[in-house]
Amino acid sequence: MAELENQHIESLDSNTYEIIQKRLQSQKGDLIQRLNALNDDRKDVFTSVDLKLIANQRITTENNCTARGIIAFDTTCIFAYNVHFGLKTDIQLSDVFSIYRFEDNQFLPQPLDFIYDENFISDYKNLYKYYRDSIFSRFKKTENYLYMVFQTSKNADNLKAFKWLIKDNQLIYQDDRSIHEVVKSPQFEFNWVKTNLENRRLGVHPHISIQDKVFIEAVGGDITFKIEDNTDNGQGIYSEPVKNIDQQLDDADYFYADLGNFIAIRIKPYQEDFRAFIFNNRTKQVINVPALNETGILLPDGQGILFSNGYYLQNGDYKIFDNSVQNLEFVRTIPSHNGEDYLYLFYQAENNIYSLMSYNIIKQQVETPIVCSGFTLFNDGKLIYFRSENEAVRHHVVQIWETPYAATLIENKEQKENHLYKIGNKDIVKAMAECQEIIHLIDKEDSYEGLYGDIAKKANDIIDAYFWIRTKETKNLDEPLEQIRSIANTAIDEFEKVQEQRKRATGLLTDLKAKVDRQLFNVKNAKGDTLEGLVHLLAENRKLLGEVISARQTKYVDLTILDSYQEQLGKTNESLSDKTIAFLLQEQALVPYEQKVIDQKAKVNEVVKVIDANVIDENCKAISGELELLIDILNSLKIEDTTQATKIIEKISVIFASLNEVRSQLKRKIDSLRTNESIAEFHAQLTLLDQSIINFLELSNSPEKCDEYHSKVSVQVEELESKFADFDDFILKIADKREEVSKAFDTRKTQLVEQINRRTSSLEQIGLRILKNIENKSSSFKTKEEILAFFSTDLMVDKVRQLVIELKDLGDVSKAENLENSVKTSQEDALRTLRDKQDLFADGENVISLGTHKFLVNKQPLDLTIIRRNDILYYHLTGTSFTYPITNDKIYAYKEIWNQDIISENNTVYRAEYLAYQIVKELQTNPALDINEAIKFRTEQNYSEGYLKGVHDFDGLEITQALLKLKAELGILTYAPETRVSAQVFWYKLETEVRDTLLKSINSAAAVQKVFPNSANYQYILNQLEELYVQWESPLRELSLKKDIAKYLYEEFSTGVFFTKAEQASQLKKQFVSFLQQKNASVTFENDINDTTLSTLDTFYLIQNWLYSYIDNEPKVAMYKKYIDETCCLLLFEKQYNYTLKENNDTVVLSNLKGNHALIVKDTYTLDYHEYMHKLEVFETESVPMFTDFISTKDMLLSEYKKSLKVNELKPRVLTSFVRNKLINEVYFPLIGNNLAKQIGVYGDNKRTARMGMLLLVSPPGYGKTTLMEYLANALGLHFVKINGPTIGHSITSIDPTEAKTSGAREELKKINLSFEMADNVMLYLDDIQHCSSEFLQKFISLADGQRKMDGIFEGESKTYDLRGKRFCIIMAGNPYTESGEKFQIPDMLANRADTYNLGDVIGSTEHLFKLSLLENAIAENTYLQKLSSNSLDDFYKLINHIETKSEEALALEGNFSNQEIEEFTAVLKKSITVRDIVLKVNQQYILSASMDNAYRTEPAFKLQGSYRDMNKMMSRIVPLMNDSEIDELILTHYENESQTLTSDTEANLLKLKELANRLTDVERQRWEDIKDIFIKQNKLGMAGKDNQVAQVLGQLMDFNQNLESIAKAIKK
């Protein structure tokens, strides 16, 4: 392997593929040598026989005859032949048959007694009597019968058979009527499939698709095979002509059989016979196989197909024998007992010819077919056949062959103990045959794509299938196979590279061929009458020659083809050069170039744009290149007259000088034009760039698109810079633009990232909320089937899965996986909860049973709320006794709405009133509003307003309709009395001229509004009225009413010239005046109000006083109280000004409302329009915002304090991998139940009132202490307060958070005090207490006593917590075996009061459950066993019991498992038990070592652990195919990884592990003894160490003492 790795490194430079090929060939040679050696050993063990010729013999007959058949029974042979009878009428048995005994490879004649039977002779003679032309056809032998078949006419199908029973190698004649039993064997061992319309692919060149692997058509004059589904052309990989060239696609019939790597195909073109082909899907090759029309027999193990004159293998090898015999039919197959050879028999009835084909599955080839006239096989496998005879003879040549086709297998009993014998010949042969397939594949090199994948797969299959190839007896075939697999895997990638390189080389040669052919054609047809033409051809020729030479650097190019191209182009180059020189020697030869230069010079003056100059520059370069080429030609050729060469060069120099002049002139022209053009072009390019930036920013709808378009724009900027690099001003602007572009795209990208983050966060929150509903819903199901159906079909679950897909599309894989895992976790939690309900719950869902005790289950979820006590608000944790006063002043500002539950209702406002008010307000802006739909929408959508459908929607509609009716009836009186009173007093206080002006303006605006209803041009009047009202100084002025007063005055005077008075005010005035008259007080009243010394305002208040006094003393007019002020106006102004009376009621009573509220008294609700509108306006503007702020403040306080208390951490979270095994159910639950009965009390009448005790769980790490208690807390509904011991540490001795030195310790101590504050339904769990000080742990002793009191500090306040009668339990857990290997000492006073259980050791007589628990806990970790436990663990327990008891009884499992699955379960469990036993030993040794004092140790402390965690890790990696050594390696590897942290103790611990597992080698055992001796010695020295001088002296004295003892023992002997 090391050598292979070195070779691999070496191959990374070049020729990698060739090196890989060499390696494969080398390994192939090694494999062949090993196979040959194994084959030789196999033949020795199994007495294998090869097919070989033993002897040639002759059988002599009395008459000349044609041999037709021979059949053997033991040593007796029946020989059949045909004699020309002529006129002979008495046909004897001896005329057709003769009998011989075969001894010592000799044929001895015998009488015909063997087939003598009177009935047979009678039937035989009758045959020739009635069928004169009868001849013997052949023998046909079955297991029990022999048939002598005769042909009764010249037609080979007219047959008659004599039937014999074969019994004890004797023949018993039966009858001559059994020809129907002589049937032909099936000629095809596979089915031909005929194509249909679905296989057609129409197009310009239509074809038939065969499995979409090959495409065939018989149109256009030929049958064509294609490998691409391309109907645009008719090109393919194979074709052959058809007779009828006009046939269409459907005129031919197509049949096929897919046989693995190749497809057998039969095609019947129009009016032709069938043609047969084989298409190899790997090599893409097609061969014509006519014999496949007759027969097709499958070779063993699917190695290929056999036909009458050859075979075709899966690896693409095939052989077609030169055999002139046609129309052979398949007879039967004779397998050898060695499983290596198969004999296939074919027969031609017309000429009685047999073809025997022997196939060897190891060599994967057919021996040359034996063609004969008859044959037979003896029981010992000898084959005897007649050479094919065309003429009648007396001496018939017979060949005797030794073959492996013996009737019975002769066992080599001497080799029974041989390893190969135990494996079995057939398995060895099969493996060798498959190895031979690999050899064939390697020999194919790179003949098809996927070859090396096939090699690697085949090698891997053999290694996996035949475990015994790893032994030296089988020549360690696995070694070359593993090398071949490794090399083939390496070759896969390299093969693709080589294929690509070869494809490139082929394409290059194709292009070169086209170019060379075109160049040769151009040269051949060139006239050569112009110098320009010659120079052009010469330039093209030289360029092409350079390409050919350059192509030599291409790998895998055919150099011979390049040599031929180079030779042709070289000759062409010489010819063109000679012609060019000859032309140059002419006087006028260079005139065309001179003229070209003159033409370019003239064009320079015409240039007006830089772009025009580019053409002239290119022309100048072309002229220069051609002239330089001419000089090269002159330099490369020998010209005898040097003066002529000089003359030509001088002419060229003159032209060069003129050309340089033109170039210089052109450059000046370009520089002049470029400056002007560049400015315009730069601004145009900059504008284009700006537009591109805008477009690309618009298209940038994702961060990736931002980067993509930013790159594109950056490229444009760079191109712009390179284009204008010579202009400094432009460069500065480009730099600014570059910075602007980067900033724009960075900003856009940031926005998109933020949008995506917001979107993904929103989707995640939606998913989490849905998951909460899913968890609630799934917890209500009663059966497993309901849960599974829910999670597979429910829309909520499907919605979460859609959110997962959307999150993945947005690129947030972490959130997607979180949701995906949460769904799975929810399902597992639901199933676990259901199992718990079925197994643990008793007396309903509120009582759980642990052993003999029953406990109430707390169903109230833990949450932080706010409660009110005596006008003080407190935080409260539900389900606990926790309360804490809220000191935030802000929330007390909302005291008046503390009792308000919903935003739409309080003590004075009914929610249906609020609903109606909103509808009425909306009608003001949208008169076309559908009231019913609006109410329905608000009822259904505004959840926070708390509307009940069918109640508040009904009441809201009733109130809305009543309001609208009142509003319509009241008209101008919809304005409240206080508004109208203020407006009237204000109006009459205005100057007369101002009032008149205002009246005219109002009348004018009203007239305009009648014509133009939508006009708002009256707004200026409203503004004027508002301004005047604001300027009016009076106690009756209400600035908040200024807009309403302006509108009221406008509306009042736009329809009339007088104020409108309410009927109620008019009635009050009337009754008041009448009352004064009755009381004779009218004069007094009139005197008061007519007092001129009083102001209008004073008079108003005087009248108001009279009216209040009147109403207070007259209850009958109390209903008019709200109209007192309006009545004052009437008494004050009505004498002077006229009023218009409007008789309408402003109150309505509704008696059909459905809701409940203080306003609805005895089903009656009174609606006062003005009071309602005022009340709702105040409610909406004051109460609603206040309630919103209150809720917001409340949520903020709860959120902050919940975060402070870390409430979410107090909820137990059960691991989905938790398994409630038998050990937990039958041992731990009863023990823990006994303890909890003392701590939290039990359900029922027998509960104890005095609560005490504590539970102490100890074990090495990984035994599930925390997981178990968190599960129990969840099951009991207890809040799980977990305290982390290592965070607190040894330095903490108090539970006062202020004494903590770290923030982590401080938070842990806060949680302890919080648990005391909560008191009820709390499980206080102190984990890893070995890291805490004894003094700290002793603080909890009082909780274990009956007093259950403990001092603590919460929020800085010292308290004494009394937990008597509370559902409070305390659990401590720890590992008593510390990392130093020593045992942690738990305080005695604590241990005495606690129930202590070791979960890492066997408790009582439960060893079998402890052992079983290691397997139960790990079952979910193994993918093979997950299916076994998917329904229940009953099948798991049955299998474990079946394995451990070694029972041979049939398994009756509940699950519907296949035999293969059960075998996999069994295999995995057996290996798991092996691992389990080692883990148990490790655990026991760990506990034993840790509990031992150092003074008593005889070996180093053992620190490796054997826990559930270790078992789970190893269990997850077990597969059924692993053997014992692989299991040992798995265990050792696991513990090697675990021991890495042990540093210097690693070696000793691993050696101890191997000792426990009984896996120590002799070397390791000696090393282990040495380590123990050294340890004992050092232990005796008190572990003083080598650096201690006293210890060193003591050590030397001990050595000296040991030597003295050895001498004394020797002397005694």
Image (spheres, rainbow, N blue to C red):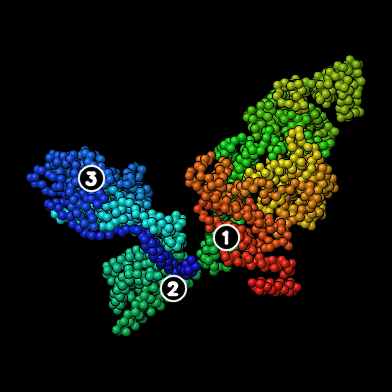
Answer left or right for 425 relative to 1059.
left
Residue at 15%, 43% (x, y): give it. 134
Q: Quadrant of residue 481?
A: bottom left
Q: Nearer the viewer, residue 4 or 718?
A: 4
Foreground mark, 3 or 2, reads 3
Sequence-earlier tag: 1 or 3: 3
Give the residue number, with chain letter if any, for mark 1. 1559
- Please, what secondary structure does the residue beneath circle 2 have? helix
Residue 1136 position within the rendered picture, expressed as x and y whole percent measured from the top left: 82, 23
The span from disc 1 to disc 2 (Cα, nearest Å) is 92 Å
Residue at 32%, 47% (x, y): give it. 189
- Please, what secondary structure does the residue beneath circle 3 have? loop
Give the residue number, with chain letter if any, for mark 3. 271
Sequence-earlier tag: 3 or 2: 3
Residue at 76%, 26% (x, y): give it. 1159
The span from disc 3 to disc 2 (Cα, nearest Å) is 77 Å
Looking at the figure, which quarter contains the C terminus? Answer: bottom right
- Please, what secondary structure does the residue beneath circle 1 have? loop
Give the residue number, with chain letter if any, for mark 2. 663
The span from disc 1 to disc 3 (Cα, nearest Å) is 78 Å
The residue carrying pointer 2 sits among few (fewer than 14), some (14 to 19) or many (20 or more) residues within 10 Å by Cα, namely some
